[in-house]
Image (spheres, rainbow, N blue to C red):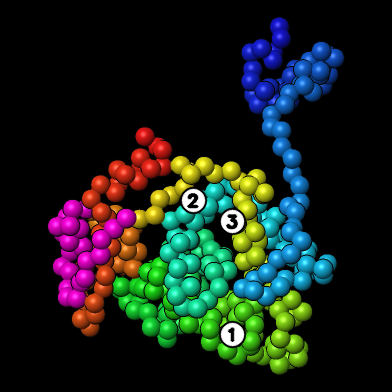
Amino acid sequence: MNITKILRPEALLLFFPILLFCSNGTVSHADAQNIQDIRLIDQEIRVPSLPDTLSFAGEETPLAYFDVREALQRELTSLCFQHSTMIYVLRLHNRYGPVIKKALKEEGLHEDFYYLCVTESMLQPLVSPANAAGYWQFLATTAKEYGLTVNNEVDERYDVEKSTRAAAAYLKKAYAEFGSWTLAAAAYNTGIKNVRERVAIQSLNNYYDMQFVPETARYVYRILAYKLLMTRPQVYGYFLEEADLFPPFEYDEVMVSGAVENWSVFAAEHGTNFKLLKMMNEWIRSNKLDNLQKKTYLVKVPKKGFRERALVSSGAQ
């Protein structure tokens, strides 16, 4: 009997140890040849290539240095082989990339800082072990310092546009001190004070020449790796069709200056549900809004029919 006609290749691999046991550790030449002929997955695993030139926020990356190339390839290799994660980031990129880049441009920052945001949160409303939260991973104290509301009902660290503008303010402050956008990015990871101390101790102000703790030493390279992969995904083996990308949200804005007793009721009154309202307004952190400070919030309400149109535009009919 030819077992390869009965068992799938992956099942045959499981059967092989049993075959050896039952045959006193020996198999026939024919069976051995069948096993050798099994091909499960053909793939080529290579070190991802680097371009001849690269820059961050207009500042050249010194790819002529071996240590710089090794550090960048380490981060790029890591991203290239996180397949499911990178596919999800690339799909989200279509939804959030234009929004974040537009806010950065309006704040006078280079769009490369978008990839810092990606590095921080992978474009998701995450919370870190240190309780940094939102798309730009602000600590609550820092968020409040830069004008964001953070309480049990509202947390603007989860507001894509407002948190981007707060991050821009922080980065501009760091740049004003160090005169380097690359060091400003490093300061976003480790703090302005920490970078200031290292500049003083090492008598340097060039990120690529300076010694940092491992997380910060890898940080800018991770940003650059995201930039390379997300601007040229096909070069690194990612082939997404337009239908694979998440569509940008379509919404109307409703001004809220008072209290909201129940966001579910509010959503129903505006032709939607709390689930979709929350998707478009992650900054809502409770099922109600007392709004004791009488602040004004712009609430994104899905346009009528967007839920179905989004499905059609993705090609998933």
| Mark 1 / mark 3, whichever is N-terminal | 1
- The quarter of the picture where residue 150 lies is bottom left
How many residues crowd around disc 2 within 10 Å: few (fewer than 14), some, or many (20 or more)? Answer: some
**Viewer-nearest residue: 26 or 54:** 54
Residue at 41%, 67% in the rendered image? 160
Find out whether residue 116 is within the magenta segment: no
- In the image, the segment drawn in magenta is 250-272
Circle 3: residue type: Met
Whole-angstrom CA distance, mark 1 to mark 3, is 25 Å
- The quarter of the picture where residue 6 lies is top right
- Name the mark on residue 255: none
| Mark 1 / mark 2, whichever is N-terminal | 2
Q: In which quarter of the image is the N terminus?
A: top right
Image height of 88 relative to 21, above or below: below
| Mark 3 / mark 2, whichever is N-terminal | 2
Q: Would you name the residue on which mark 1 appears?
A: 175
Q: Would you name the residue on which mark 2 appears?
A: 91
Circle 2: residue type: Arg
Q: Would you name the residue on which mark 3 appears?
A: 230
